[in-house]
Image (cartoon, rainbow, N blue to C red):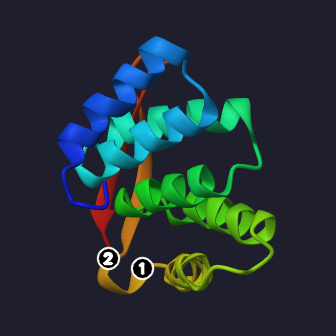
Amino acid sequence: MAAGEFEIALRAYTRAASQHGPSVDVLSAIGSANLRLGRLGQAEQDLRRALEQDSTFVAAHNNLGVVLAEQGKWGEAHLHFRNAFSYDAGRSAEIGENLRLAIENMEKTGYDDVEAHQLLLMRRGSGRFLLLSTPL
């Protein structure tokens, strides 16, 4: 991983998991490698599995926060960054910065760029409805 060889690292971590079992360290490492390879869905799954084994594992919380932030899920990312910061006792400046960015992005509503719409509910038969959206 340190050399930037994420595919090679992923193969090594996967081999370790098959030989020694999927420990929290190995699952977190696999998730981190998948994150660096841009495989966000797989990374999220691996990191969640790591946290099922140890809900206080700092690296897994931080990296899952990064995955969720990359997907625009700032609320959940904030929770994982906050957990990582708490379990790390605030020692990591990088985790603190991730937490700050998550808080900042959660505060942005995004409504400024969206045109206002009126929602209308039309009945379309017995128990069926159609939701219509029209600009105001």
Is 12 or 136 nearer to us in this picture? 12
Q: Residue 25 is drawn in which quadrant?
A: top right
Where does label 1 land, which residue? 111
Tell me which residue sits at (47%, 33%) in the image: 46
Tag of residue 88: none
| Residue 80 place in picture, x, y as percent | 64, 59
Tell me which residue sits at (43%, 24%) in the image: 16
- Whether label 2 touches label 1, CB < 8 Å: yes
| Residue 123 place in picture, x, y as percent | 44, 29
| Residue 65 place in picture, x, y as percent | 53, 59
Along the horizontal axis of the image, is 132 left or right of 60? Answer: left
Is disc 2 placed on a helix, strand or loop?
Answer: loop
Note whether 43 is above or below 98 in the view shown: above
- The alpha-carbon separation of the residues under discs 2 and 1 comes to 5 Å
Tag of residue 114: 2
Is 13 or 132 nearer to us in this picture? 13
| Residue type highlighted by circle 2 | Val
Along the horizontal axis of the image, is 6 left or right of 32? Answer: left
Is disc 1 placed on a helix, strand or loop?
Answer: helix
Image quarter in which the C terminus is found: bottom left
Q: How would you rate the neighbour count of disc 1 (Cα within 10 Å): few for under 14, some for 14-19, many for 20 or more? A: few
| Residue 2 place in picture, x, y as percent | 31, 61
Q: How would you rate the neighbour count of disc 2 (Cα within 10 Å): few for under 14, some for 14-19, many for 20 or more? A: few
